[in-house]
C-alpha cells in the first residue's frame, strides 16, 4: 500500500495561538519538496488529504494549500469546503484577466484567498478587493518595505501573514508593524504526517476517465463503476458532503453524482486520476494512454462511419495497460467486458481499429514511411492526422491540468 506524506506547518496569530496549517506535499519521509510538477503535487495533496484524512490532519483549523495557475483557472478549490480551506495563489502565477475572473468567482462563493510570497506590483492591484490574506516572505521583502504596503492597505480588511519568522525579535517587529498571522521556524518546523494512502483500482480510474470524457455522460455507468471501488466511493462521498452546494448529508452515489453535476464530476475524476498515477511508472505513460484515446477517437471519425468513436477511445485508452499493469494485454483484456473489435485491435492489431492504433504508434515514433503507408490504406490525408494529433495533445492537457 502506498503511503501519503504531508508536511504541515502551523500558522499562528499574535497570541501564538494556532489558527491553521500550511499543507505541503511530500513524496517521502525526508520532509523536503519533491522534484515533481506543481500541478501533480497539488493533486496528490488534495486527493490524499482532503478526500481522505482531512479531519485527522486539520481538526477544526484552516488548511492553507498552494494552487498552481491551471488548477485556479479550472477552479479546482471549489471541489472542497470553503469554510476551512485557504486558497493560496502561488507566487509564479501570472496576474491574467482569466485568473482574475476565477478569483472573483471563488471569492463570491466564500473562499478565503491568499497571495503567497507576495511582492508588491501594480499588476496585482485589481486583485486586492478579492484577497483576504497577503503573505510576505520577510527574507525577500524586508519588514520596513512590508510596512509601507501594510499601512497603505490598513483599512482594506486584508490580513497580513509574515513567513520565515525565525527569531523572537522578528516576531515582535512583525507584530508591531501590523502583521496578524505568523509562520516560520521560530514557532515550528514543518511536521511530517504519514498516512496510508487510499488508492483506487487503476482500471476503475481508467474506465471512469473514459466515461467522463464522453459528450453525454452515462450516470448509471459512472455509478456502477464508483460503487464497486471502495476508495472511489469514499472519496466521492467525502468530496460531495464537504461541498458548499450540499445542505444535507448525501448518502447514495446517485445523489452524489446529481449534486456534483457534469463539470465538477469531470474535475473530481481528473483530480483522482492524476493523483493516482502509479508511483513505479513514469507519469507520461498514463498521460499518453489518455492522449492515444482521444487521438484514436478523432481519427476513426475521419476513417469510418461504421465504427462508434467511443470504441476507438477505449482502444487508445487501453493500449498501454500492459506496460502500466505489468501484465500481458491478453490477460488484462480477458478480465474486462469489452467489445470484440476493441479486443482484436489490442491483441492482434487487426481491423480498422488495429490499423488506426498502428498508425498512432508509428506517428509517435516518427516512422514517417509507415505513417504514409497506413494513411494510404485508411484513405487519410497527412494534414488531417497532424491536426488530430495536435487536438489530442491539447485535449489531454486540458483534461489533466486540473
Image (cartoon, grey):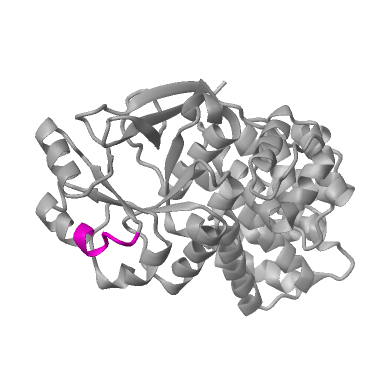
For residue 24, what is the image quadrant?
Answer: top left
Say if residue 235 shows up in the picture.
yes
Image coordinates of residue 39 in percent, x first then y, are: 46, 49
Image coordinates of residue 5 in percent, x first then y, are: 44, 27
Judge whether 211 appears above or below 215 on screen.
above
- Residue 315 or residue 181, whichever sits in front: 181
Q: In the rendered view of the protein, which quadrant contains the C terminus?
A: bottom right
- Residue 321 or residue 75, whichever sits in front: 75
Residue at horizontal 49%, vertical 43%? Answer: 85
In the picture, measured across the screen, residue 401 lies left or right of residue 262, that is left
Residue at horizontal 38%, vertical 30%? Answer: 7
User: Does the stretch in magenta take in 199?
Assistant: no
In the picture, measured across the screen, residue 67 lies left or right of residue 198, that is left
Residue at horizontal 23%, vertical 63%? Answer: 120
Q: How many marks?
A: 0
In the picture, measured across the screen, residue 23 lies left or right of residue 336, that is left
Judge whether 344 appears above or below 121 on screen.
above
In the picture, measured across the screen, residue 347 lies left or right of residue 67, that is right
- Residue 307 or residue 356, whichever sits in front: 307
Q: Residue furthest front?
A: 155
Image coordinates of residue 106 in percent, x first then y, are: 53, 58
For residue 13, what is the image quadrant?
Answer: top left
Say if residue 4 shows up in the picture.
no
Image coordinates of residue 45 in percent, x first then y, are: 48, 37
Q: In the rendered view of the protein, which quadrant contains the N terminus?
A: top right
- Residue 335 or residue 377, whichever sits in front: 335
Judge whether 275 appears above or below 109 on screen.
above
For residue 324, what is the image quadrant?
Answer: top right
* Highlighted magenta segment, given as a residue range: 150-156
Amino acid at each position: 500500500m502506498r503511503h501519503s506524506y504531508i508536511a504541515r506547518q502551523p500558522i499562528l496569530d499574535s497570541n501564538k495561538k494556532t489558527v491553521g496549517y500550511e499543507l505541503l506535499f511530500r513524496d517521502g519521509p525526508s520532509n523536503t519538496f519533491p522534484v515533481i510538477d506543481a500541478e501533480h503535487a497539488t493533486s496528490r495533496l488534495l486527493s490524499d488529504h482532503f478526500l481522505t484524512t482531512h479531519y485527522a490532519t486539520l481538526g477544526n483549523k484552516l488548511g492553507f494549500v498552494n494552487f498552481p495557475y491551471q488548477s485556479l483557472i479550472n477552479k479546482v478549490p471549489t471541489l472542497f469546503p470553503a469554510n476551512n480551506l485557504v486558497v493560496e495563489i502561488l507566487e509564479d502565477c501570472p496576474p491574467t484577466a482569466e485568473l482574475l475572473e476565477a478569483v472573483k468567482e471563488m471569492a463570491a462563493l466564500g473562499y478565503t484567498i491568499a497571495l503567497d510570497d507576495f511582492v508588491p506590483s501594480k499588476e496585482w492591484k485589481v486583485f486586492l478587493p478579492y484577497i483576504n490574506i497577503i503573505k510576505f516572505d520577510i527574507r525577500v521583502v524586508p519588514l520596513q518595505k512590508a510596512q509601507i504596503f501594510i499601512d497603505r492597505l490598513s483599512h482594506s480588511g486584508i490580513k497580513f501573514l509574515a513567513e520565515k519568522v525565525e527569531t523572537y525579535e522578528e516576531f515582535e517587529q512583525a507584530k508591531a508593524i501590523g502583521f496578524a498571522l505568523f509562520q516560520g521556524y521560530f514557532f515550528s518546523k514543518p511536521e511530517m504526517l504519514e498516512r496510508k494512502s487510499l488508492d483506487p483500482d487503476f482500471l476503475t480510474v481508467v474506465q471512469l476517465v473514459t466515461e467522463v470524457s464522453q459528450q453525454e455522460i452515462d450516470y448509471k455507468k459512472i455509478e456502477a463503476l464508483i460503487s464497486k471501488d471502495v476508495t472511489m466511493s469514499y472519496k466521492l462521498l467525502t468530496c460531495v458532503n464537504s461541498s458548499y452546494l450540499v445542505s444535507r448529508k448525501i448518502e447514495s452515489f446517485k445523489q452524489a453524482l446529481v449534486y456534483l453535476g457534469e463539470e465538477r464530476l469531470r474535475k473530481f475524476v481528473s483530480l483522482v486520476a492524476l493523483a493516482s498515477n502509479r508511483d513505479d511508472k513514469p507519469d507520461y505513460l498514463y498521460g499518453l494512454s489518455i492522449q492515444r484515446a482521444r487521438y484514436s477517437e478523432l481519427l476513426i471519425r475521419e476513417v469510418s462511419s461504421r465504427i462508434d468513436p467511443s470504441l476507438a477511445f477505449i482502444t487508445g485508452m487501453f493500449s498501454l495497460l500492459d506496460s502500466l499493469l505489468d501484465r500481458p494485454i491478453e490477460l488484462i483484456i480477458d478480465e474486462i467486458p469489452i467489445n470484440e473489435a476493441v479486443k482484436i485491435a489490442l491483441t492482434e492489431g487487426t481491423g480498422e481499429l488495429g490499423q488506426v492504433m498502428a498508425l498512432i504508434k508509428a506517428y509517435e515514433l516518427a516512422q514517417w514511411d509507415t505513417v504514409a503507408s497506413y494513411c494510404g490504406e485508411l484513405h487519410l490525408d497527412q494534414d488531417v492526422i497532424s491536426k488530430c494529433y495536435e487536438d489530442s495533445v491539447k485535449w489531454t492537457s486540458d483534461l489533466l491540468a486540473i
